[in-house]
Image: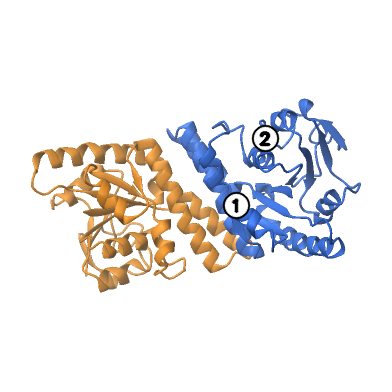
Chain colours: A orange, B blue
C-alpha cells in the first residue's frame, strides 16, 4: 500500500489526476499479478482549511477548535474528490483493508481517525501532510507521496534548483510541506516523495521506482 | 422549543450573540418557572459553503455532491460556534431532547439528520434556512427565527422600507432567505421571523412576543 497526499493547491484540477491514476494503476496491476499496487489518497483541506485560518485570525476560535475544524475540512475535500472521480471513500482502516480487496485506489476521509486517536499536536504546523505521515506509520506503509503544484523541493524558492534528494533534517522551513512531517519521517522508516500532481505519470514513476522529476526525502 | 438559524453573514461576530442569548434566556427561564424557553440553533454554512459554490463553478462537482458538501459545511460552522461560546452541540433529535433537560441553548449539527432522511431537494435553493424550516416541522416547533445581518425583510433592497409583516407567498426572490423556505412556511404551521442577529435583544423580544425591529412572515 502506498499513501498519496493530494494537496489543496491541486483541488480545482485533481479530476484529471484521479482519473489518470485510476487508469494507470489498473494497467500496472493488470501487468503485475503478484504484487498489486494499492493507493490510499489523503486529501488536503484546501480553501476550506484556509477559511478556518481566516476565522481563527478574526475571532476567538481556539487552537484546539481550529485543529478540529481544519481536520474536518480534509473530509470535505475527500467528499469532493469522490464526487468528481467516482473513487470510493473510507473513513477507517478496517474498511480501507476490506475495500482494497476489490479497489486499487481509495480516498481516505481522515477526521474520524485523526480525532479518534488525537495523537497529533493541535497546531497549524500539523496539516494533512502530517496526517498522511501518521497514517503511513500506523498502517506500516513504507512509501508516502506528497503531491503539490510544484515539481518537488528546491534548494531555494523561487528560482532555486530542484533537488533529487534531500535529508529530512535539513528541509525545515523552506518548502511547501508542513513543519511537523520532517520529524515524522526522521523518526519512522518511511520513504517520502514530493512531486507535482499536475503530472500523473511522475506519480506512476515513483510507484515503479523509476527516475523522474520529483524529490525523494531521505531519513 | 424555538429554532434560531444563525446566518453565515454573522459568523465572524456571533460570539457576542451566543453569549448574550445564553445569559438572557437563563434570565427568562429563571423568572418563568412554568414554561421554559429552549433555543435550538441551526448554523449556516458561511464561507465554507461559499467555497463549495466556488468549487462547483470551477469544476465538474455534481449538484448532489455540492448539496452534500454544503450540508457538511453547516456542521463546521456549528463546531466553530461551540468553540467560541461553549454552547453544547447535538447531531440528532434524541440527544437534543435529552440535553434540553439541562441546557437552555443547543447548537445543532445538521448534516447527520439532513443526509439521513434526504428529504430536501438537492439544490442551491435549499440552504440552512430550509434546514431550519424542515427541522422545525419535524419536531413540531411552531416558532422559527432567521437571524441575518439586516433588520428584516424590506419592500425593496437596498433603500426600501422595513416590513413588520409579509405574506410568505409574496417574498420570493427579493430577500436574503433562501428560495425554498417560503414554500415550507406556507405548507406548514410555523411562525417565522427574520431579525438582525447583531442585536440579541431583538431575538429575546421575539421569544417574549414583544414588538421590536424584525419582520414576521405570515403563512
Q: Which mark is on residue B178? A: 2
- Closer-to-camera residue (A18/B192): B192
- From this viewpoint, is residue A174 visible? yes
Helix or strand or loop: what does disc 1 sit on?
A: helix
Q: Position of residue A39 (x, y in %)?
A: 24, 49
* B20 with respect to A50 (left or right): right
- 10 Å crowding of disc 1: few (<14), some (14-19), many (20+): few
Q: Label 2: chain?
A: B
Q: Quadrant of residue A105?
A: top left
Q: Position of residue B34 (x, y in %)?
A: 84, 58
Q: Position of residue A197 (x, y in %)?
A: 30, 47
Q: Which mark is on residue B61? A: none
Quadrant (top left/top right/bottom left/bottom right) for the C terminus of chain B: top right
The residue indicated by pointer 1 is: B94
Q: CA distance from mark 1 to mark 2?
A: 27 Å
Q: Are marks 1 and 2 in contact (CB under 8 Å)?
A: no
- From this viewpoint, is residue B53 visible? no
Amino acid at each position: 500500500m502506498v499513501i498519496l497526499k493530494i494537496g489543496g493547491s491541486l483541488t480545482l484540477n485533481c479530476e484529471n489526476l484521479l482519473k489518470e491514476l485510476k487508469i494507470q494503476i489498473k494497467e500496472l496491476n493488470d501487468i503485475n499479478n503478484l504484487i498489486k499496487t494499492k493507493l490510499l489518497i489523503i486529501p488536503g483541506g484546501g480553501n476550506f482549511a484556509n477559511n478556518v485560518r481566516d476565522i481563527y485570525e478574526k475571532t476567538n476560535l481556539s487552537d484546539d477548535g481550529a485543529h478540529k475544524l481544519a481536520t474536518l475540512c480534509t473530509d470535505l475535500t475527500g467528499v469532493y474528490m469522490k464526487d468528481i472521480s467516482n473513487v470510493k471513500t473510507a473513513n477507517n482502516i478496517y474498511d480501507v483493508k476490506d475495500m482494497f480487496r476489490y479497489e486499487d485506489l481509495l480516498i481516505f476521509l481522515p477526521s474520524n481517525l485523526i480525532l479518534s486517536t488525537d495523537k497529533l499536536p493541535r497546531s497549524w504546523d500539523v496539516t494533512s501532510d502530517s496526517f498522511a505521515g501518521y497514517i503511513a506509520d500506523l498502517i506500516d506503509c513504507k512509501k508516502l507521496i506528497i503531491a503539490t503544484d510544484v515539481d518537488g523541493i528546491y534548494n531555494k524558492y523561487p528560482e532555486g534548483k530542484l533537488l533529487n534528494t534531500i535529508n529530512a533534517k535539513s528541509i525545515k522551513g523552506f518548502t511547501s510541506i508542513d513543519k511537523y512531517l520532517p520529524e515524522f519521517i526522521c523518526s519512522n522508516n518511511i520513504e517520502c516523495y514530493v512531486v507535482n500532481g499536475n503530472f500523473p505519470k511522475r506519480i506512476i514513476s515513483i510507484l515503479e521506482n523509476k527516475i523522474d522529476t520529483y524529490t525523494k526525502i531521505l531519513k
